[in-house]
Amino acid sequence: MGANPPPPVEVPPLLEVRDLRVRFPVRTGIMHRPTAWVHAVEDLSLVLRGGETLGLVGESGSGKTTVGRAIVRVNEPQSGSIRLGGQELLGLGGRALRRHRRRLQMVFQDPYSSLEPRQTISQVLAEPLRTHGLASGAARRGRIEELMSIVGLPASRSDRYPHEFSGGQRQRIAIARALAVEPDLIVCDEPVSSLDVSIQAQVINLLETIQSSLGVAYLFISHDLAVVHHIADQLAVMYLGRIVETGPAADVYARPRHPYTVALLSAVSVPDATIERARRRTVLSGELPSPTNPPSGCAFHTRCPLRRELGDPEICATELPSTVTAAPGHTVSCHFADRDALDAPNLPGAPL
């Protein structure tokens, strides 16, 4: 008899964020002393494996962008842990942080403001190569031409300035700049929200092609679940600074367990008129609460349709829900996670 096959090896995560907390002071008076704090991110944890895409979604003001900027250390967290490839990043500074930043890059929402308008595209792409000492002379010029080719732009246009390109082309240049140092992870902060729908599809397809060929991982931040549906392997739903639901994207889309996730998905249009007419809409009442004075208990309880349906249980307003496993790899933070939140919104792969 042959030997039993060895057990599968557990691959450690590329990015592991634990109990991340980011707060900003509200300063008033002549002395500009802090009188309150904006609770932008509270005790947030997430995991991303190499070569995968984690979609981070939520309304404007939920703290998504702050998470991305904290991971790349643009915003400094008050507490928590950010580990990239097993290396803790929060304790690093100076040259040590610069070495690890080569593995971690970011693509911002507005491609025009993120590019230096007084530099040619060749200079924009050369800067990270020079900063990290990766190439010089002919090798640097060759690498710039390669990057332009990867993002689908002619190398002959690298001597032009950002204002000479369209919005979609500028975002391709921003992607090329992020790829210049061969990162393991790219944080994409609403990278297509400012683009036309047809251009959005082109940029999403480009990101998928790059991931297939280079194996780069993405943290893809967006408020548009239809866009995230096409690129994400895992999905994390964020509300008022906290993660309320995570899991495999297909599972979360097919069977959302948190009422906030259900509401977000129900707002996405389905390109099938019969299905669209039959769907039950979940309309949230009220506005997103102020992160300066977040609600007690479950932060979502002030807008939760499930809470009203269940007769306003006191636990929602008094106790913070724990995170429970609703299915393998699928977690949810809700006092009633064992119950189907509302009718699933039925989102069958709507094309961009």
Image (spheres, rainbow, N blue to C red):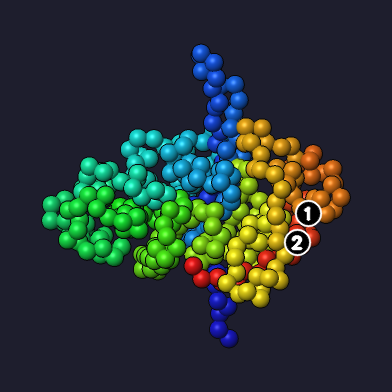
Please state if 349 lies on the left or on the right of 137 as rendered.
Answer: right
Rendered image quadrant of residue 242: top right
Q: In the rendered image of this protein, does residue 114 appear above or below residue 77?
A: below
Choose between 296 and 98: the one closer to the eye.
296
The kind of residue tagged 2 is Leu
Per the rendering, the mark at residue 306 is 1
Report if the CB atoms under discs 1 and 2 are less than 8 Å apart: yes
Residue 141, percent across and down? 16, 56
The residue that appears at 54% across and 31% down in the rendered structure is: 24
- Residue behind mark 2: 342
- 284 vs 169, left or right, is right
Which tag, 1 or 2, sits closer to the chain's start?
A: 1
Q: Quadrant of residue 10?
A: bottom right
Q: Quadrant of the N terminus?
A: bottom right
Q: Residues within 10 Å of mark 2 (few under 14, many from 20)?
A: many
Of residues 164 and 14, the one nearer the viewer is 164
Q: Position of residue 103 (x, y in %)?
A: 37, 51
How far is mark 1 from mark 2, CA to CA? 7 Å
Indicate left or right for 215 with 230 as reference: left
Residue placed furthest toward the left: 138
Picture quadrant of residue 37: top right
Q: Amino acid at mark 1?
A: Leu
Question: What is the count of numbered marks?
Answer: 2
Q: Position of residue 239 (x, y in %)?
A: 63, 47
Q: How many C-alpha atoms fall within 10 Å of the one at disc 1: few (<14), some, or many (≥20)?
A: some
User: Which residue is farthest top?
Assistant: 30
Query: For the point 31% across and 56% down, which residue is it?
Result: 166
